[in-house]
Image (spheres, rainbow, N blue to C red):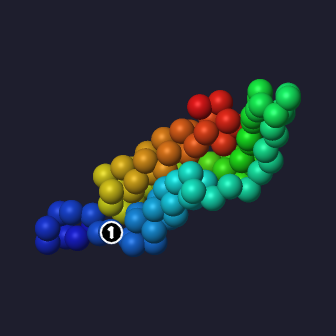
Amino acid sequence: MDEKAGTPRIDARDDVVWPLVGVVLAVVPFWVFGGTTSRTTVNGEVVTEAAVNLLGLVLAAVAVVIGVKRLRQRGGAVAVRRTLAAVAIVAGLVQVPFSLGVW
């Protein structure tokens, strides 16, 4: 806490970097695919197609864990850390159905 201004000091690593790492990990699988695909064709026509992004599932889980861990942390710039942690959690949770091919 900065005694003169009465505002908390920002710890760059805990308040900004780790939550941003969570956001990046949750967003990267939208462009990077590391999983399996399946396609069924009948008489030359594609009738079913499915894809599961295993890398996306792992990175989404890591992003959610990082976000939850940063939400529970005390001290520092609470508003900055909690906002970025919430974004990481939401992005990770949105990534799960995309990676499963449901959405």
Given residues 68 and 60, the one toward you in this image is: 60
Q: Is residue 29 visible?
A: yes
When asked about the image quadrant of residue 17, the answer is bottom left
When asked about the image quadrant of residue 3, the answer is bottom left
Quadrant in which the C terminus appears: top right
Q: Position of residue 102 (x, y in %)?
A: 65, 30
Residue at 33% from the left image edge and 68% from the top image edge: 10
Residue at 85% from the left image edge and 29% from the top image edge: 43
Quadrant in which the N terminus appears: bottom left
Q: Is residue 62 visible?
A: no
**Total labels drawn:** 1
Going by the image, does 79 lie left or right of 66? left
Going by the image, does 12 lie left or right of 70? left
| Mark 1 secondary-structure assignment | loop
Residue type beneath disc 1: Ile
Residue at 54% from the left image edge and 39% from the top image edge: 94
Residue at 14% from the left image edge and 72% from the top image edge: 4
Residue identified by numbered label 1: 10
In the depicted structure, whether residue 25 falls above or below residue 45? below
Going by the image, does 72 lie left or right of 100? left
* Mark 1 surroundings within 10 Å by alpha-carbon count, few (fewer than 14), some (14 through 19), many (20 or more): some
In the depicted structure, whether residue 95 falls above or below residue 16? above
Given residues 90 and 48, the one toward you in this image is: 48
Q: Position of residue 79 (x, y in %)?
A: 31, 52
Q: Position of residue 11 (x, y in %)?
A: 38, 71
In the depicted structure, whether residue 2 falls above or below residue 25? below
